[in-house]
Each structure stands twice: as C-alpha cells, then as structure tokens.
C-alpha cells in the first residue's frame, strides 16, 4: 500500500514533471492563459497517460523489444485521438482554445517517458498509480500556472472576477512573454527553496559530524 | 530478414487494430460533435445574424450545385412559419487559415442582414480584429449590388488587409451564390477596378493634410459662426497654433476650438480640440495628423479612444489608466494625447477668458 | 510572389514557432548552451520541418482525405515522421557523411519534437496549397533556427555573469525567452495581414 501511495505523491511533488523534471514544457507555456484550459489540458494528458500506461503494461510481454517504441507511439496516438474527439464532443469551447496542443499530447515526452521507464517494466497496478501521480502532478502544475496568468492577466479566476474594479489587467500575462516570465519565476522560486533546504541539510550533517567527533 | 518481417507485421497489426478502434469511436462521437457544432452555429451564429427569426430550418435542396465553401444553409422562419431570411455558414481563406463565419441575408430586399465571425486563427490584435463589431457592423443591411471591396465600400482594418479583404469578398460572393442556388435571381455587380491598386488604409494620410478649419463643424456642431483669434498672437499658450471662437445664432460665445501639438512616439501629433465654454467640458477632439506606428500608435485615431474625451470635464486629471483608457501597446501615444489635451484646453480657456 | 514573401516572414518572425507558438520548447531550453549545438539542431530540425510538412500535406490530401480516414491523422503522421527521420538518417549517412557527422546526433532527438508534429497538423488544418505549405515550412525552420541561435548567443555571453545561483540554468533561460518573445511581438506590425 505504502508503495502505491508513494507513487502518487512522488509524481505530485518530488518528481513533478513540470516544476521538478522540466519535461514536456510546451503545454505548460502554451495553454495556460486561463485556469480552466490548464486544468482541462492537464486532465486530458492524465487520461492519455493512465490509459496508455495501463495498456502498455498489460501488453509488455507481447510486444517485441525492437519495435516497442513505435508500438508505444501508436498506442499513445490512438488514445490521444480518442481524447481529442471526446473533448470536441463535451467541451467544444475549451477544445477550440487548446487547439493544436491536444493532438500534440502524442509527442509529450512525459507520456513516452513513463511508458518506457515505468510501464514497460512494472506490474499493471503500479503503472496505474505512477501514471495517476504523474498526471495529477502535471495537472496541478498547469492549473497553477493558469491561475497566476488568469488572475494577473484578466483579473479573474476560473472565470469569476476576483480583482476589484480598479485593477488594470496585465495584458502581457495573457500573451506569450507572460508564459515565459511566469514559468521562469516559478522555477526560480523552487530553486531558491531547494537551495535553502540543501543548505539546512548540510548544516544538520555538519552538526552531526561535530557531535560524533566530540563523542569520539 | 525473418525478424524484420516480424517487426513490420507487429507494427502493421497494431496500427490496423488502432485504425479499427478509432474508426468505431469516430463514428460514434462524430454525430455528437457535429450536432454540438450545429446547435452552436444556430445559437451563437444564425440567431445573431437573423435576429428576427423565430426558428431555423435546414435547407437541403436548391438549383444546381451547392455553392462551394458553403457548409450549411438554413432558413429563418417567423412565428407564423413564414421565411424571413436565409442564414448560412461559410469560410474565407484568411492569412493564417480559414475564417468561419455565419451570414444572414434577406432575399426580399437582396441585402445582407448581418455577419458574425465564428472562429479563426488570425494573429491576436491584428487580423483577429475582424471579430470587432466596428468591422462586422459595416455589413448590416448592405445591398448585394455593392461590390464588397475593401477600400471602396468596406473600410478594412489597418494592418489586417488580407483578413478584411477575405471576409468582405467572401460575404458578398457567397451571399449572391446562395440566393441564386435557392432560386432567387441576384445580379453580380460589375466591379470597377479600384482606382488605386492597393486599398487605402488611412484615407487621411493620402489626402490633403487635415487642418482645423475642415473639422470645426464636426467639433462644435451647435455653433453658427466661427471667428479666428489670430495666429501666433502674443501670450497664446505654447504649442497652440490657432484658436477659434464659436458663437450661436444670438451671437453668444458658446465654444472654443484650437489646434495643438502633442509629442508622440514617432513625432508630432497635431490635433484639433473643441471646448464647451459654459460647462467647461470638452466637446470633442480630432487627430489631424501624426506619424505613429501603423496599427499601434496610429490607433489613437480610432473613435473608441477619441470618444472618451467627449463631454469630459476640464478638471479631470486626464491620466491614462485613471480616467482615460489608453491603447494597448501604444501607451506613449495615448498618454501624449490625453495629457496635452487636458493641459492645453485649460490654458486656452484661461487665455481666452482674460 | 508578394503573398509568398508575406507567408515566409509571417511564419519566421510574426508567428515564430518557438517564441510565439510554443512549439519546440524542449530543444530551445535544452540545446542552447552552445552556439554550434544550437545551429546544428536548428538546421537539422529545419530540414525535417520542411520534409515532414510536404509529406504530411501529400499524405493528407491524396490518401487520408480520399479514403475518409482523417481521424487517423495523429497516428499516421507520427509514424510517418518516425519513418522519415530514420530514412533521412540512412540517406545522409550514405550520401553525405560530412553532414551526417554534423547533424546525425540531433536527428534522433527530432522524432518526438512537437514542432515537427505541430507543423504537420498545422498545414493540414490551414487550407494551404502545396507550395504555400513549402514556403510556410521554410519560414518555420528559419524562425526556429533563429530563435535557437539567438538564445545560444545570449546564454554563452551570460555563462560568466554573476547571477543568483537559483536563477542559473532553466530559470534564466525562461526569463530571457520572455524578453525575446516580447521583442518578437513587435514583428506583428510587419506583415499587413
């Protein structure tokens, strides 16, 4: 049980694909003009990730080693097409905003990466929890960026007005440069926290060494 | 060799299975998608372009071939089931891809009732401005005998000539074709070649430079008579070149108009300002000439921006972001205009009343 | 002719693949530490961009559209790109070993580059003719190379600049990209769309 929980938590934070591993960077920049589009893009990617990881894990012994990458790609592409059609049927407005980036889930390194590194080696149940963790990690990252850009760029959050009348929209946040700036500052902040922690760990370690030294 | 064959076979098999599954899935979802799109088109498109119609009914048959590029034709019916107009969906080839739009036509008067841009992939702020009502409203109640040409009977959008041309041409051509297809007889107008090979983007720039005399009546429409206070007179506020006094029919001074210069981003911006003396408010302003960047600073000429000054009290701060909305990406130009108008109007009023 | 020129400028500068459309961010962040690498990657990707744009237009117009199999676009295009890259690699190795030496290592990375898949999907959705597609793809390649080379040039200069340790690497690259992207927004006035 612990293992499964760990799979999920790992994807959410420690190995968060967007903030920590910095892979599959196109969607976090391109479709995060609003929180809703970030959320839906994240969920669509999660759905593809779970479906393809499961199927690949089930079929792993049947797929010849030499063609495994092309076969993975076809499986992923199939699920992407399905998600594309489902989004077009259920949420046409959001589907229009996401546009090109729904079919481009197929080349998101996150999905092929998980298929190759995890699903093709691990049992089905662990592949599902791993995909769930990674997918949700990706989803919350996209939603978070979307929230920042929507709040500052349009003064709203999930469509509801948050900022007061006097707030002047930072239009740049809705334009391409805003995406780069937001993402750059988030990575910067995370690095700051990471460095701070590393220093604390070092200090703690040094203290311990001193203690040990004294005892010796 | 046997290995390679095995690999190709495996991959082929997987692709075939994928194709089969997707085929089934596609056949199941596509009707839903299409139905959604159609409801969307009727609700957001057709109802907007034929506002008087009560219900819409699909029209399947006509004379000859259905016009190319027209995807759906609907008739708009009133409450009694009488046909009052035709609405159809078509696409124009824009700069970046198709521009899908809904068009409503009235077969009786042979006019376009309205158009609405449904989706497009033009660049935001440039081609995308075809969505704006100031552009689409030009097509309301437009006769199909018109040429539908940007530069002659349609005002194009600055820096978006290709997109505006595409929309205008398609609306005219397809409306005529659809009506003909449905059995109405619409003549295609003989289109004279426009005088200039390129459509005029800013008519003001190619014509004689505007001077304040030409716009006096526009600025102060109530006034009957104007007298000039003299050019270059001593004591006139700096950068103010001409001042006019405006009188009503009783000889009462009602307004002032003056010409002044603001320092824009690309050079001088010359403008004419009208003041209502009694209420100490602005009657209106007009840009006479400028050399700001096309599509950016040049948007200070747009009514959306200029109309903000009409009726504005001279005691207002005239600051962008406070009481005047600036133009995106043209802050310097908008600040220059707003600031200068405010300061100079106060100075001129002061000068004239002493 | 003028239309074609506008299309070229439009796809290279106004709607730059990397800085405005966000396609190909991975090589843009990952392969721009050195100028030579960036140039090699840019040129290799440009080559594949043009070839796959033309191929996808042909496949879509003469096979998928004819057979009503447009829903297979994603599957077919990704396989097609994978095959093309393999083929290109073999051809280059045989015919132009010099070029292969310079470009070969980048080719393998290109299959899952979203710029390549992106252009394939863009051209079939845009209604371009075959020649328009080709010009569009050349412009896209030029713009892609330009963005990568500019980025690498800036990053090489910044290598020895004293920045906060937390900003080193990706964070700084993203902030620079933001400033470059602002610059590219200015090109919007260049093409009278």
Image (cartoon, coloured by chain):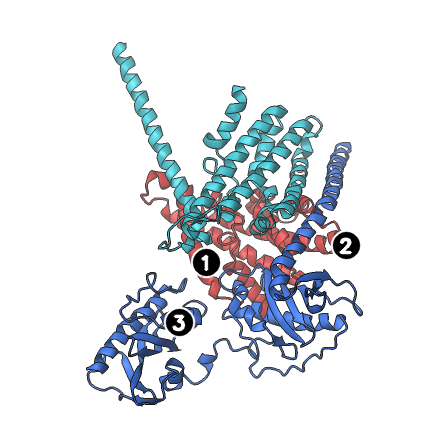
Chain colours: A cyan, B blue, C red
Q: Residue furthest front?
A: B80
The secondary element bearing badge 1 is classed as helix
Q: Residue B33: where, in percent of width, then height?
A: 67, 49
Mark linked to residue B306: 3
The secondary element bearing badge 2 is classed as helix
Quarter of the rendering containing residue B167: bottom right
Do the residues at discs 3 and 2 belong to one chain?
no
Which of pointers 1 and 3 indicates the residue nearer the eye? 3
**Above or below A46: residue B316:** below
Cα–Cα span, label 1 and label 2: 39 Å
Is residue B269 visible in this depiction of the protein? Answer: no
User: Toward the viewer: B153 or A141?
Assistant: B153
Do the residues at discs 1 and 3 belong to one chain?
no
Residue of label 2: C66
Q: Residue A9: where, in percent of width, then height?
A: 49, 28
Cα–Cα span, label 3 and label 2: 54 Å
* Residue shown at the point (48%, 34%) measured from the top left: A16
Residue of label 1: C184
């Amino acid at each position: 049980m612990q293992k499964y929980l760990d799979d999920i938590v790992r994807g959410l934070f420690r190995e968060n694909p967007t903030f920590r591993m910095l892979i599959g960077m196109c969607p976090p920049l391109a479709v995060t003009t609003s929180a809703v589009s970030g959320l839906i893009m994240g969920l669509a990617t999660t759905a593809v990730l779970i479906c393809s990881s499961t199927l690949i894990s089930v079929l792993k012994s049947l797929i010849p080693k030499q063609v495994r990458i092309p076969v993975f790609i076809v499986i992923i592409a199939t699920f992407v097409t399905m998600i594309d059609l489902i989004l077009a049927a259920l949420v046409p407005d959001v589907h229009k905003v996401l546009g090109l980036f729904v079919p481009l889930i197929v080349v998101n390194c996150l999905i092929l990466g998980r298929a190759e590194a995890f699903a093709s080696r691990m049992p089905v149940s662990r592949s599902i929890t791993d995909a769930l963790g990674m997918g949700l990690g990706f989803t919350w990252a996209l939603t978070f960026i979307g929230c920042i850009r929507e709040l500052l760029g349009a003064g709203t959050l999930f469509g509801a007005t948050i900022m007061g009348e006097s707030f002047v929209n930072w239009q740049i946040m809705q334009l391409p440069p805003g995406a780069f700036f937001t993402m750059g500052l988030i990575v910067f902040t995370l690095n700051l926290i990471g460095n701070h922690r590393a220093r604390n760990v070092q200090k703690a370690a040094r203290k311990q060494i001193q203690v040990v030294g004294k005892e010796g | 060799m046997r290995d390679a064959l095995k690999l190709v076979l495996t991959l082929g098999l997987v692709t075939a299975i994928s194709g089969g599954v997707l085929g089934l899935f596609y056949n199941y979802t596509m009707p839903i998608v299409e139905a959604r799109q159609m409801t969307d088109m009727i609700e957001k498109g057709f109802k907007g372009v034929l506002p008087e119609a009560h219900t819409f009914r699909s029209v399947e048959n006509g004379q000859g071939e259905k016009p190319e590029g027209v995807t759906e034709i609907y008739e708009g019916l009133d409450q009694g089931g009488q046909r009052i107009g035709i609405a159809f969906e078509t696409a124009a080839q824009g700069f970046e891809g198709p521009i899908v739009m809904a068009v409503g036509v009235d077969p009786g008067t042979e006019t376009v009732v309205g158009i609405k841009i449904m989706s497009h992939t033009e660049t935001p702020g440039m081609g995308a401005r075809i969505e704006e009502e100031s552009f689409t409203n030009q097509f309301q109640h437009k006769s199909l005998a018109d040429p539908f040409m940007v530069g002659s009977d349609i005002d194009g959008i600055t820096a978006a000539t290709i997109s505006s041309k595409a929309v205008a041409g398609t609306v005219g051509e397809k409306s005529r074709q659809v009506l003909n297809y449905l059995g109405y007889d619409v003549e295609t107008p003989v289109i004279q070649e426009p005088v200039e090979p390129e459509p005029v983007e800013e008519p003001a720039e190619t014509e004689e430079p505007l001077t304040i005399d030409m716009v006096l009546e526009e600025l102060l429409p109530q006034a009957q008579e104007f007298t000039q206070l003299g050019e270059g007179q001593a004591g006139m506020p700096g950068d103010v070149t001409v001042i006019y006094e405006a009188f009503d029919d009783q000889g009462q001074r009602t307004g002032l108009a003056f010409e002044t210069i603001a320092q824009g981003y690309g050079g001088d911006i010359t403008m004419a300002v009208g003041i209502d003396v009694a209420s100490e408010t602005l009657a209106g302003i007009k840009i006479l000439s400028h050399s700001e960047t096309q599509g950016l600073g040049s948007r200070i000429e747009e009514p959306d921006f200029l109309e903000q000054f009409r009726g504005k009290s001279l005691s207002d701060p005239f600051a962008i972001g406070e009481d005047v909305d600036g133009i995106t990406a043209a802050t310097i130009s908008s600040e220059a205009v707003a600031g200068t108008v405010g300061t100079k109007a106060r100075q001129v009023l002061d000068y004239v009343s002493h | 002719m003028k239309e074609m020129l506008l299309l070229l400028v439009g796809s290279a500068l106004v709607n730059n693949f990397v800085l405005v459309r966000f396609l190909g961010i991975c090589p843009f962040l990952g392969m721009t530490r050195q100028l030579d690498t960036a140039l090699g990657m840019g040129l290799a990707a440009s080559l594949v961009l043009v070839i796959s744009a033309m191929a996808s237009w042909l496949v879509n117009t003469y096979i998928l559209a004819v057979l009503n199999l447009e829903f297979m676009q994603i599957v077919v295009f990704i396989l097609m790109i994978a095959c093309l890259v393999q083929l290109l690699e073999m051809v280059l190795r045989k015919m132009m070993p010099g070029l292969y030496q310079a470009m070969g290592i980048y080719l393998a990375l290109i299959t899952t580059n979203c710029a390549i898949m992106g252009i394939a999907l863009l051209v079939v959705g845009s209604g371009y003719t075959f020649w328009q597609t080709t010009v569009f793809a050349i412009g896209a390649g030029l713009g892609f190379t330009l963005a990568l080379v500019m980025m690498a040039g800036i990053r090489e200069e910044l290598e020895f600049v004293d920045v906060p340790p937390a900003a080193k690497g990706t964070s700084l690259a993203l902030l620079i990209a933001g400033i470059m992207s602002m610059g590219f927004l200015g090109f919007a006035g260049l093409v009278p769309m």
